[in-house]
Image (tube, rainbow, N blue to C red):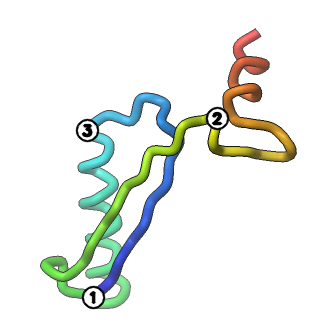
Amino acid sequence: MPYIHIQVTDEGVTNAQKQSLIKGVTQLMVDVLGKNPQTTFVVIDEVPTDNWGIGFEQVTALRQRQAQ
């Protein structure tokens, strides 16, 4: 019973994109490990960019600097 946990920043991930992720990783588990898709769980967490850090900084600050 695979459990796949995907974490992404909350920067406009659409419902269609989430559905594609769910389908894609489920198919990967079927293809690579022969897992049953009916017992494969996929959870997507959207993390606010204030709560995600890279190299000493919040992603929010990094994104703001990149936009300038």
Instruction: Give the mark nearest the N terminus, 3 or 2.
Output: 3
The residue singled out by tag 1 in the image is 1
In this rendered view, identify the residue nearer to me: 31 or 45: 45
Q: Nearer the viewer, mark 1 or mark 2?
A: 2
Q: Secondary structure at mark 2?
A: helix
Q: Residues within 10 Å of mark 2 (few under 14, many from 20)?
A: few
The residue singled out by tag 3 in the image is 15
Q: Secondary structure at mark 1?
A: loop
Instruction: Give the mark nearest the N terminus, 1 or 2.
Output: 1
Q: Which mark is residue 50?
A: 2
* Three-letter code, disc 2: Asp
Q: Quadrant of the C terminus?
A: top right
Spatial CA distance of label 1 from label 3 is 24 Å
In this rendered view, identify the residue nearer to me: 28 or 6: 6
* Three-letter code, disc 3: Asn
| Residue 47 point in image, percent of width and height | 51, 44
Residue sitting at 25 percent across and 38 percent down? 15
